[in-house]
Image (tube, rainbow, N blue to C red):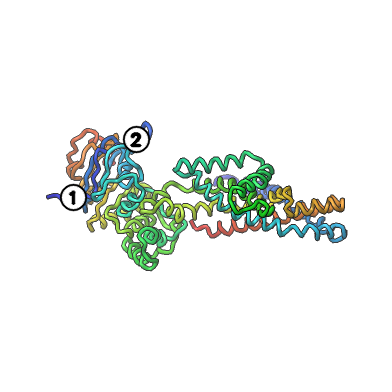
Amino acid sequence: MDGPHGDATMLEDLESLDTQQRDWRQFPWWLLGIFLIAVYAIYIFLTRPSYQEAFQFIMIGLGITISTSLYAYLIALVLGLLAGLGRISNNIVIKNLATLYVELVRGIPILVLIFYLALVAVPGIADAIPGISNDNISLNFRAIIALSVTYGAFLAEIFRAGIQSIGRGQMEAARSLGMSYGQAMRHVILPQAIRNVLPALGNDFVAMVKDSSLVSVLAVRDITQVARLYAGRTFRFAEAYTVLAVMYLALTLILSFLVKRLESRLEAKGGR
Amino acid sequence: MAAKPIIEVKNLHKHFGEVRALNGVSLSVDPGKVVVIVGPSGSGKSTLLRCLNHLEVESAGEVWIDGIRLTRDQKQINEVRTEIGMVFQLFNLFPHLTALENITLAQKVVRGRSEAEAEQIARAQLARVGIADKADVHPGQLSGGQQQRVAIARALAMNPKIMLFDEPTSALDPEMIKEVLDVMLDLAREGMTMVVVTHEMGFARAAADQLIFMDYGKIIEQGKPTEIFNNPKEDRTKLFLSQILQH
């Protein structure tokens, strides 16, 4: 370096100014916002009995919200994997059926899908199968079916993208060793693909927990439905919906945090 | 009284849409022989190799492996593939598995070997290619040359009768080429039937029983490597050789 000393110092100053500025800009102000909301919520909760009452009432629905989301997500994972594999199948019939499913679901609002699946499709199928009466199928079950069919289509696209992100050479190497398509998929492609899409799968679980509020239209007693009941009965709308909103926020924040941790643990384990 | 050829290719054509990658190639390889295929890029040599284990399905013509004509029947092709090991330019190791697991997977899944047996064979193959100490390492932590040797060990663990090599050293740094070529030379000496697509003329000279020069999806010239290197008959061959040997 032939530059005079002054230049170097100035450059350092500029750099440090730059980092200072960046620190200020990169501070997660949104997180501070959420923190303040949480503090305010706790404050209200502790000081106003009406909020405590609303919270206790709405808590009743938490089990349903969580179990509906969990069951629906597990079924959606299976549906999504099958449909995702179907989307990339060489079999034209399977491929088109899978694509039809994905496109149908993507083209219809979730709320309409939930009405349709729970109140038209499920009864239709129940009527077609002898020995099963439509009356015996609980609304909770219908809600789970409706949510899982909907999210199965979303997850199918995630699985498809994940599988397609694995280079062609992997399949060729597996096949050249004598593995069948299924064996190669199971032992070579899917383990890598699923690891790549785990963050996306986690995000969709969070999204599904939020969308599970839609099943309240089926009178399933999840937290949304219970909050509506509470509000209607007591006319305490502010209490009911503030508590409800804070509960969803808490749920999704906790889940997002878990997803992020899973993600960083996978990255740390990485070892490619 | 020539031995029955283990590979026979009859008037093979392969089109990718408008592109004619193979334009009537016939070839026969006797057991234990080493065939080296050279030619400019786009000449169809990799496509020919990939037709031998049906990674590409021919548009017309016939491929016979060990007396069996390859068809589109998936079960048949899976069986034939267990007899044909293949080594790729980009190694194609499974990145989520260790070197050892890369070698045991197909043994267990395809050959039905027990974990213990597969592992024993895998360790023996890793020792053979000179990296016994890398068994528990993931491919990402291996050098290119080491990765390619694991890939060779993976193929050999299936006890193939034929080994196909698709430009096995083209993606390697120069200092790693030798370690891979040495393994291949050993294999050739041990009497493995090999079909090798490569730009390594030194390997061709040292190991090839038969050298094939391809261009425009056709075999332009074939024969003993010394004959073709010293006394090429076709103008295309002369031009190609002068281009690659001239530095």
Is residue A47 left or right of A175 when viewed as pictured? right
Foreground of the two, A142 or A10: A142
User: Can see residue A5?
Assistant: no
For mark 2, give the secondary structure. Answer: strand
Asked if the residue at tag 1 contacts the one at tag 2, i.e. Cβ–Cβ closer than 8 Å, the answer is no
Is residue A116 left or right of A92 when viewed as pictured? right
The structure residue drawn at horizontal position 53% and vertical position 43%, both measured from the top left corner, is A98
Residue indicated by mark 2: B15
Q: Amino acid at mark 2?
A: His
For mark 1, give the secondary structure. Answer: loop
Give percent across and percent down for residue B81: 33, 52
Q: CA distance from mark 2 to mark 1?
A: 29 Å
The structure residue drawn at horizontal position 45% and vertical position 47%, both measured from the top left corner, is A167
Residue indicated by mark 1: B4
Q: Amino acid at mark 1?
A: Lys
Foreground of the two, A214 or B58: A214
The quadrant of the picture occupied by the C terminus of chain B is top left
Above/below status of B115 relative to B29: below
Foreground of the two, B7 or B201: B7
User: Can see residue A73?
Assistant: yes
Give percent across and percent down for residue A39: 80, 57
